[in-house]
Amino acid sequence: MQNQKGIISLCSRENIGKLLYVTVFLLPLTTWFYIPLVIAFLMSIYRMYAVRQVEWKAGSLCEVGAAFLICSFCSVINSLDKIFSIFNWFFLPCMYAILYMLIVSYLDTIKKKKKLLLCFLGAAAAVAGYGIWQYIHIDYMIAHVINQEWVDTKEFPHLYRRMYSTLENPNLCATYFLIVISYVGAFFLFEKEIKNKVILMGIGSVATLCLALTYSRGAWVSLLFILFIYASIYDKKIFTLFTLVPFILYFYEGQVVLRFLSLFSTHDTSVGMRFTLWANTLDIIKDFPLLGCGWGTFYLTYPMYDSLVKDAGILIYHAHNMYLSLIATIGFLGAFSYFFILFGHAWYAWRLYSTVTNSFYKAMGLGTLAAVAAISVNGIGDYTLFSVSISMCYWSMMALFMSCYVDISPSIEPKEQDSMRQ
């Protein structure tokens, strides 16, 4: 009996929360984040068994999330490697769901939520610091960029470096900083203390610099949409920042401008490649409209639709378009549930933002709206949520937002019901 009490004490809500802090800090840095996450999950199971009470919560999109998990699992039927698909399904979407559920369930106070946010920002500082160090060491950077073929050297002969830091490639790094900027910018706007405002400005400035040094064109466009969200919802004066864009493009003749303008050209091989990818992916969708070609096995199916890729032995893991990639792999039903979750967070974020007066909750609402907008726009030309680290980071922040919405939803629902009756 004494031992059981000791184990229950060890599996306290506070200790589960501490493991979640460690998990979120490790997400962009190493795959070792699975260790504290799995331990936290097992502790929560034992805790519920011991206290005979279900503590898990998943928020307002719980049913749709379950539908996505079911649809994505059913897609295994069409997979060319069913064992790999099942393993990948357990290791990715199930783990996303576990992290999401644990954050919503156990971070039930603003103090705990702030601690998780600090861990997220601490990790961002580490990613930025290593990325800057990496960028400064030009010899190492040049060799790696050329080996990975991240730059069309014919189109951009003077572009030697692209920051990628602890992430796998520059586009993933750029998406990570888009998520960081979305929330840092939102909290900067609502922060009242000068000291904290200066700190947030510093973090945001460094994150923006790192984003620029990834030379990820889609991410730059997404950054403009983050500003658009801030301007539309918080203060229309922010629209004046858009006037700087044409001046920068006109007066600054550097690689940043050349990369940005190449968005509107098919001379860059990466742009032309995307059009070919999309056309072939549409053929996959025509053949597997309901369940897709199988979770995680796009790279096995795609060569059947592109002889050049097949002959060259190149692995194409996704269609460089979030929307097409998901429809192709899990079908229209699964993709619909996924996008319902994605944009559903924006809907609830707006409800949170427009209802509460608490500055922390309002900042979380605005930051979530900005993050969803950034990911949605960036997803047109890439599918960076394919990365485990990026998806984990993104959904952990969505979960943190949902934990805020769960806090105040009892006060929102009655008001909406009353207004409907009237």
Image (cartoon, grey):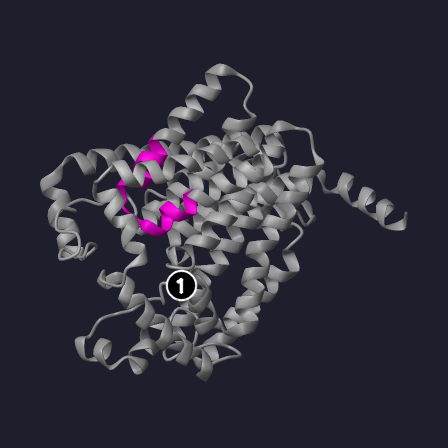
123 vs 285: above or below: above
262 vs 362, nearest the viewer:
262
89 vs 339, nearest the viewer:
339
Residue bearing mark 1: 321
37 vs 2: above or below: below
Q: Secondary structure at mark 1?
A: loop
Residue 20 percent location from the top left of the image: 49, 40
Measuring 23% from the left and 75% from the top, which residue is drawn there? 309
Residue 233 percent location from the top left of the image: 60, 38
Residue 215 in magenta? yes
Amino acid type, callout 1: Asn
Residue 217 in magenta? yes
Mark 1 crowdedness (10 Å alpha carbons): few <14, some 14-19, many ≥20: some
Which residue is farthest top?
194
189 vs 218: above or below: above
Residue 123 picture quarter:
top left
Which residue is farthest right?
422
Q: Quadrant of the N terminus?
A: top right
In the shown orientation, is residue 138 left or right of residue 73? left
363 vs 1, nearest the viewer:
363
In the shown orientation, is residue 170 left or right of residue 155? right
Q: Which residues are magenta?
A: 206-223
Residue 189 percent location from the top left of the image: 53, 28
Residue 364 percent location from the top left of the image: 57, 37
Measuring 82% from the left and 42% from the top, which residue is drawn there? 415
Tell me which secondary structure the magenta stretch mostly adopts: helix
Residue 119 shows up from this direction:
yes
Measuring 59% from the left and 50% from the top, which residue is drawn there? 345
Measuring 57% from the left and 72% from the top, which residue is drawn there? 333
